[in-house]
Image: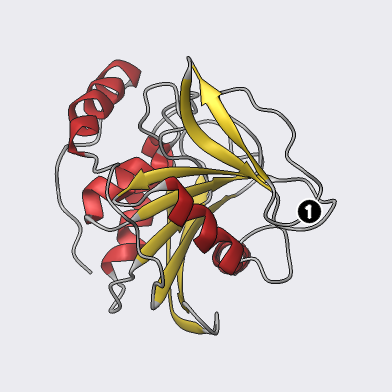
Amino acid sequence: MEVRDLHAWPPGPEEAEAIQDRLRPMLELDVPGPARPRTVAGLDVSYAGDGGGTGTRLAAAVVVLDGTSLEVLEESVAVGTAAFPYVPGLFAFRELPTLLNALHDLKTVPDLLVCDGFGVAHPRRFGLACHLGVLTGLPTIGVGKTAFVGAYERPGRRRGDASPLTDGGEIVGRVLRTRDDVKPVFVSVGHRTDLDTACRNVLGLTPEYRLPETTRRADRLSRDALAG
């Protein structure tokens, strides 16, 4: 699939923040998302060792699932190294070069991308899901295991219960319970979808486990690539 080449890879944090600021106005955040996506792609990255520092070996995986049956339709994986240091809020610059290599090799153009990370629930409202959405032009959401920014009240105990994730008086995501009495996940919009639709899609991707099947399968594929 095609990915737009909108910027060079920055040498340091100042340049990376400038790229986020320049691309943020390109986000489409007030449009309806795909209510019944035919194909959904999960993206995840695994690191060798503790994952810190530059030069760390990593594997980026993309797994495309049927939006109804959740059967795997296509897989793509790329192995590379982290060329950007670990800086909170700039994590995308460590992962995107290798993720984009994996996306380039896909024959399927998914209706929805699901990232293991964040969209507008980010200090500059431009997390990994936003960045991927702008570069691909596809509807994109982020599903985080823990909160990165914002405050929230604990949602109810049942699957589907949710509460707003707020930062600076702004709703930046939703804390969503995907399993009864299991820790919630943190859903935020990346590009070309709305939060209600994003949460409905996350529930559709979690028939058995806390994390979406997209994330679980991409995580397994990336770990296998590092081990092999």
- Residue at image x 23%, y 49%? 135
The quadrant in which the N terminus is found is bottom left
The quadrant in which the C terminus is found is bottom right
**Horizontal and vertical percent position of residue 180:** 81, 56
- Residue at image x 30%, y 78%? 108
**Horizontal and vertical percent position of residue 152:** 65, 27
Q: Is residue 82 above or below residue 73?
A: above
Amino acid type at image mark 1: Arg
Residue 226 in sight from this viewpoint: no
Say left or right for 46 vs 196.
Answer: right
User: Camera-side residue: 74 or 181?
Assistant: 181
- Residue at image x 67%, y 55%? 160
Secondary structure found at label 1: loop
Say left or right for 156 vs 90.
Answer: right
**Horizontal and vertical percent position of residue 191:** 31, 47
**Horizontal and vertical percent position of residue 95:** 42, 45
Q: Residues within 10 Å of mark 1 (few under 14, many from 20)?
A: some
Q: Extreme right residue here?
A: 181
Q: Please identify the quarter of the rendering in which residue 84 is found.
A: top left
What is the image's colouring?
Answer: secondary structure
For disc 1, the marked residue is 158
Say left or right for 23 vs 39.
Answer: left
User: Camera-side residue: 14 or 143?
Assistant: 143
Q: Is residue 25 above or below residue 18?
A: below
Residue 107 in sight from this viewpoint: yes
